[in-house]
Amino acid sequence: MLRRFRRSLKIGTKTMMSHVLLALFVVVLAAVLSYVLTVQYVGRVRMADLQRKAVRIAETVHSGAEGRLFPNRRTVRVYEDLTDARVFFLDADSERIRMSRYSPETGDAAAEELQWVDVIDTIDREFARSILNGESVTATHRFEFMEDEIMLAGVPVAGDAGAIAGGVILAQPVAQLHSLTRAVRLLALLIGSVSLLAAILLSLQQTRMLVGPILKLTRAARRMTDGIYAERITSLPDNEIGDLGRALNSMSGRLMDVIRNLRKERDKLEWVIKGIGEGLVAVDANWNLVHVNAAFLELMELERPGDIQAAEGVALGMIRAMLDRCLAGGPAESLECRNPSGRALHAEASPIVEDDGKILGTVCMLRDVSEAERMEQLRREYVANVSHELRTPLTGIRGMVEPLIDGCMDTEEERQESYRVILRETMRLEKLVGEMLDMSRLQDGRLTVELEPMELPGILHAAVRGMQPIADEAGVTLSIETDGSPLACMGNEDRITQVLVILLDNALSFTPAGGSVTVFARDEGDRLAVGVRDTGCGIEPKDLPMIWERFYKADKSRMRTTGTGLGLAIAKLVTRMMGGTIDAKSEPGKGSEFTFTLKKPARDQ
């Protein structure tokens, strides 16, 4: 800030000095020209006045009988007093000058007669001859007979016969003119000094009026270069500089609006880039990092953006090599890789090219395709499982129908057994198709659940009654465990029964004869917990997280019956639609416990 102030002060000082020097030059030049012209004018006026006086004297003098000029010394004295000049008379015959001399003893001009002085000097002779030739002449010379620089004005004097009888010469010392010019010089100096002082003051005022707004404009422009666009220039004059300042204010306001809009767009772009799940990295032509989002660092398992260029790793090396190829002028390309934790990644890179074909940099988009790969694998497994599950009952049905058609069943008992097998496999096929339809409707949202307040004990008993024959056939004890309260909840009776039947069917399938299966319900404060607990073989820890997947089946050697593998997946979807959760706990060899939760009705219901 101090440096800028000094710079501004320096600029103002330079401007002021230039104005002062210009004013000084103008004033001095005007003073000198005025002085010279005034001196010349005064000299011309004095010379013309001297010549005019000489003409008047020439008109009054006359020549004597001898044809010579015999002026009376008293008359000459009068002439000299009136003209304030020395009066000489030039004789035409002798070319001598007649003048009065003062007595050295008395200093009285009256004591002496007019004396004749010979014209000796060449300049004097030429001057005298011009007069005798009838010319009126003026000159400023140093004459020998005067021993001083004088102004001379000479006119011819005509005689009685009309011829030139002589001439009258008026002489005045230049010293008298010098005294006048000194006065003019003093006056010019005084006027010049006053004018110079006024010019300096005016220059200072004009400099302040000119430099002040310019310094304001400079400060505002410098602040704009520093990124401060809210700067406004006030107190502007009503001239071109003021118009420039107002234009700068308008430009600053518009520039601030443009930059504000650009910042908004930049922030929006930043939000979009940060919000997308894909990783994004951009580098310029010199491999300087331009942008990288958190998703890219997370997918590549990096801590800092600088690790992109320095860290080691197969996937990172492949991506760097792909970016290098794009920067070298290669086309857009993509690759598949895996990060250090084994997640599958898909990277796409493309160069950023200007209109003239120059490559500015390259950008790379990184996506996590692990879930897509998993879903693709699940899709293949789903198709395989569905095909397998459909083929098993169809194979059984075909195995019974073909002998019946061929007449291989001789006895009625064999035919009835074939019919029972066909019926069982048909029911199994129907169950599979129904569960697949339920699963599809639940996932697509086409199946809705209407929730209403109800009490659980009746639903629990109905589910147990429905599964009791299967339990009796398997030799498993089936019981209900509640705290005796109404256990009111918000739910759908059919869907709650569906979840209980799925859980009971699984429990009976994995519980050996002599075991027990318990259906329980309890109040847990804001929710009700409902579940099925068995004393079966349990589930291995490695299988426990996978039991909710479609078509997933645990160790089939432990199962009494063959299921479709869709039951628990359906139970999870149905429970979620009723606003609850479902969980499982199991210990191999000691049994399992499946629990799902239901909301309680509001107090005003």
Image: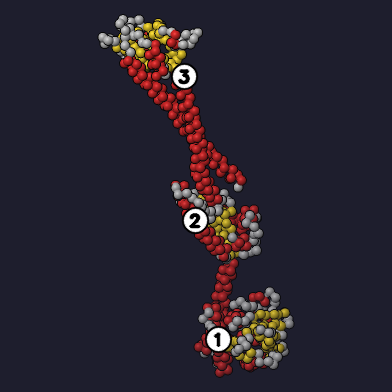
Q: CA distance from mark 2 to mark 1?
A: 60 Å
- Label 3 sits on a secondary structure element that is helix
Q: CA distance from mark 1 to mark 3?
A: 133 Å
What is the crowding at mark 3: few (fewer than 14 residues within 10 Å), some, or many (at least 20)? few
- Identify which residue is drawn at 57% across, 91% down: 420
- Identify which residue is drawn at 38% across, 16% down: 79
Does 4 sit above or below residue 112?
below
The disc labelled 3 sits on which kind of residue? Ala
Q: Quadrant of residue 545?
A: bottom right
**Which of the numbered marks, if any, corresponds to residue 253?**
2
The disc labelled 1 sits on which kind of residue? Glu
Q: Which residue position holds label 1?
A: 450
The disc labelled 2 sits on which kind of residue? Gly
Which badge, 1 or 3, is on the more N-terminal residue?
3
Closest to the observer, 87 or 559: 87
Q: CA distance from mark 2 to mark 3?
A: 74 Å
Q: Which residue position holds label 3?
A: 175
- Identify which residue is drawn at 38% across, 8% down: 97
Closest to the observer, 378 or 172: 172
What is the crowding at mark 1: few (fewer than 14 residues within 10 Å), some, or many (at least 20)? few
**Which of the numbered marks, if any, corresponds to residue 360?**
none
Which of labels 1 and 3 is toward the front? 3
- Identify which residue is drawn at 57% across, 42% down: 9
